[in-house]
Amino acid sequence: MMTGCCSGGARVTVEVERLVVEGETCDRCASTWDAARQAVEMVAAEASGIGLAVDLREVPLSPERISDSNRVLVNGRLVEEWLDGSAAMTECASCGDLVGESVCCRSYEIDGLASDSLSAADIARAIRVAAGLAAPSESPSGDSPRTSVVLVTSSECG
């Protein structure tokens, strides 16, 4: 959220929660982490002249917190909430390989497109919305296009 002119500028914090087991993470979480780094760099470069600072934090999660895995929060609010999207828990073979059993982690639907991980364009748009630089419905301009991914939901994922 933007702060007053005398407060030293605005600051947006991006937190990526991802499963980490013995230094390894799942494919979805790795993709989302890479996208978050790209988004932070992109928005920081765009907003450098207006005093907006964007911080990126990794939040490693143990298998006991897998239900929070592959989440991205911008100023404490989930990216899908900033963008009027949704999330679901879907079976993740990569997480399963790391924990040794069938498990589910977060997948997304943003702008009608389903994906196992968030794109840099979506995360950057959420950062812009949080900073008051864009509206949730504004389509990303100049950002890389997203491809739709078919999600297979296991009945065990709830």
Image (cartoon, helix red, strand yellow):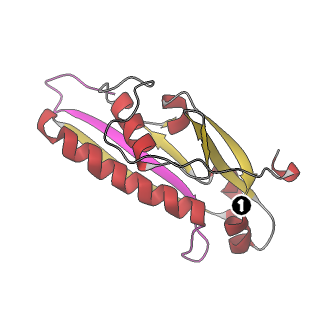
Magenta range is: 1-26
Q: Position of residue 8 (x, y in %)?
A: 16, 33
Quadrant of the image containing the C terminus: top right
Quadrant of the image containing the N terminus: top left
Q: Quadrant of residue 137?
A: top left
Question: Residue at image x 54%, y 30%?
Answer: 81
- Toward the viewer: 79 or 2? 79
User: Where 84 sits versus 118, above or below?
Assistant: above
- Toward the viewer: 36 or 147? 147
Task: Determine which residue is flagged by label 1.
Answer: 92
Q: Is residue 35 within the magenta segment?
A: no
Q: Quadrant of residue 19?
A: bottom right
- Toward the viewer: 117 or 15? 117
Residue 55 visible in this rendered orientation of the protein = yes
Residue, far bottom: 22
Question: Residue at image x 68%, y 66%?
Answer: 95
Q: Secondary structure at mark 1?
A: loop
Left or right position of 40 against 94:
left
Q: Is residue 7 within the magenta segment?
A: yes
Q: Position of residue 115 (x, y in %)?
A: 60, 48
